[in-house]
Image (cartoon, rainbow, N blue to C red):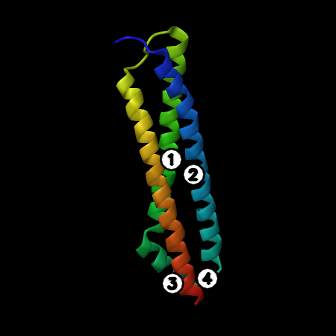
Amino acid sequence: MAYHEAFWAVVGAASPVIALASIVSVSDMMNHAFEWSRYRRDRPRRAVRELTERSALGMLTKFSIITQTTNLVLQALALLFALLSLAAAVNMIPRWIAIVIEVLGLTRLAIGALATYRVKITQRLIRDLMDG
């Protein structure tokens, strides 16, 4: 398999961008989790707990955070292999693996964004139900 410097330069440029988006996604989800815990603390525990469990908010929040954190690790690996490949002027891993990592990264970002949106909407609906 021939070495492609331009390919590794693109992977090396794309990985930090995708990783940064993952960090922003985790931060956003953590902010919603913190706000939700403050909201729950000020309301009757049983009613909010039941609505939260039925809506699977906790599971969605954990899923999103785990998805984006693993995405961050994958992007760090892609960047590592891109930099090593550029430094040694040889493909350190097959290019198809780097392609899969980058496509998975973008897919995980989309899934994380959908989960975050779902959590925001569900929290808003529960607040509307609880606060009248």
Instruction: In the rendered view, tell whether residue 60 sits above or below residue 25.
Output: below
Mark sitting on residue 47: 3
| Identity of the residue drawn at 53% across and 33% down | 15
The mark that comes first in sequence, 4 or 1, is 4
At mark 1, the secondary structure is helix
Amino acid carrying label 1: it is Gln
The mark that comes first in sequence, 2 or 4, is 2
Residue that badge 2 annotates: 26
Of marks 4 and 1, the one in the foreground: 1
Mark 4 nearby-residue class (10 Å; few <14, some 14–19, many ≥20): some
**Quadrant occupied by the C terminus:** bottom right
Picture mark count: 4
Amino acid carrying label 2: it is Val
Residue that badge 4 annotates: 43
Mark 3 nearby-residue class (10 Å; few <14, some 14–19, many ≥20): few
User: Do residues under tags 3 and 4 come within 8 Å of each other at their CB atoms?
Assistant: yes
| Identity of the residue drawn at 48% across and 53% down | 112
The mark that comes first in sequence, 3 or 1, is 3
Q: CA distance from mark 1 to mark 2?
A: 6 Å
Residue that badge 1 annotates: 68
Residue 4 point in image, percent of width and height? 44, 15
Residue 109 point in image, percent of width and height? 48, 48
Mark 2 nearby-residue class (10 Å; few <14, some 14–19, many ≥20): many
Of marks 3 and 1, the one in the foreground: 1
At mark 4, the secondary structure is loop
The mark that comes first in sequence, 1 or 2, is 2
Q: CA distance from mark 3 to mark 1?
A: 30 Å
